[in-house]
Amino acid sequence: MGLLLFVWFGLTCGGIVLLIWLLASLSGTLGVLLGFAVLLVGLSALLWIGRALRHAVTPLGDVMEAASQVAEGDYAVRVTERGPREMRALARAFNAMTTRLQSNEEQRRDMLADITHELRTPIAEMKVNHHLLTANPENQPVYLDRLGRTIARLENLIEDLLRLSRLDQERVELELKAVNLNTLVGQTVTDRRPLAEQRDLDLVFEGLARVPTVWADANLIEQALSVLLTNAINYSSPGSQIVVETLTRELDDRQWVGFQVTDSGPGIPEDELPHLFERFYRGKAGRDS
């Protein structure tokens, strides 16, 4: 582009000089005056065109420089919208692109942190049960059953990562079946109890005498309960109690079945409540843990 501008500038100057020479060949003062007039007009036109070109080329240079920064991994870079309408539109589109790239990168980092956080619990459970198995070999069937269920939950967690990808593509399919919440919740609490005891916590399950069977995805329910139990164990004070209950409720002339986890943890700060169901959001306590 620089070579083309140089050639164009040279031809333009040559044309002006030729025109002045022709006018100067006219006899008398009139030819000289016309020559100076043409020279002034030509120089003014060149200055105006130069400024216009600089006005158009400078924003393009901003975008090219910013693109080099993005190529190096800096997605926070933005360019100022200036210059002709087309250049402003280009800068606006570039800024929108880098905003999306930055958001995707932040989500990727949050997802990795979330995966690491979720994997800690089953790994900790496996270590505890392995220790108990070594220390109490006479109870081998109990600890092996717990290890088997923990491995199954770890497998389900990995499958849920794939399910998350399908959910983004709106291709998720729920695996619905008859579920007894007392059985599911009670078993999960039993498997998690050694980890709670290791941290000097009393994990208690209080199930309803009779709980209606629900049609649900057992793996997703267990994962939701696992997250609540993990947070309760991580943030409860040593020596305190964690209570898990099944419950029923009437709402809109329908009976609903659920569970709740009560602990002595600090709870969720009020300013973080609006983000509770935001994907990959981690509060200050979670980021510091």
Image (tube, helix red, strand yellow):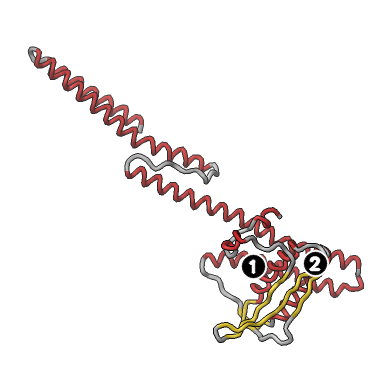
Image spot of residue 264 (x, y percent): 74, 66
Disc on the earlier residue, 1 or 2: 1
- Residue 211, picture quadrant: bottom right
Q: Residues within 10 Å of mark 2 (few under 14, many from 20)?
A: some
Residue 122 shows in this picture: no
Residue 31 shows in this picture: yes
Q: Secondary structure at mark 1?
A: helix
Mark 1 and mark 2: Cα distance apart in space:
34 Å
Image spot of residue 240 (x, y percent): 80, 67
Q: Residue at x 64, y 57 (%)?
A: 283
Residue 53 in the figure: left or right of residue 156: left
Q: Residue at x 55, y 44 (%)?
A: 73
Q: Which mark is residue 225?
A: none
Q: Secondary structure at mark 2?
A: loop
- Residue 107, picture quadrant: bottom right
Which of the pair 279/237 is nearer the observer? Answer: 237
Q: Residue at x 10, y 13 (%)?
A: 29
- Label 2 sits on residue: 240
- Residue 42, picture quadrant: top left
Residue 252 in the figure: left or right of residue 237: left
Image spot of residue 101 (x, y percent): 51, 51
Which quadrant, please, contains the N terminus? top left
Q: Is residue 75 above or below residue 131?
A: above
- Label 1 sits on residue: 159
Amino acid of disc 2: Ser
Amino acid of disc 1: Glu
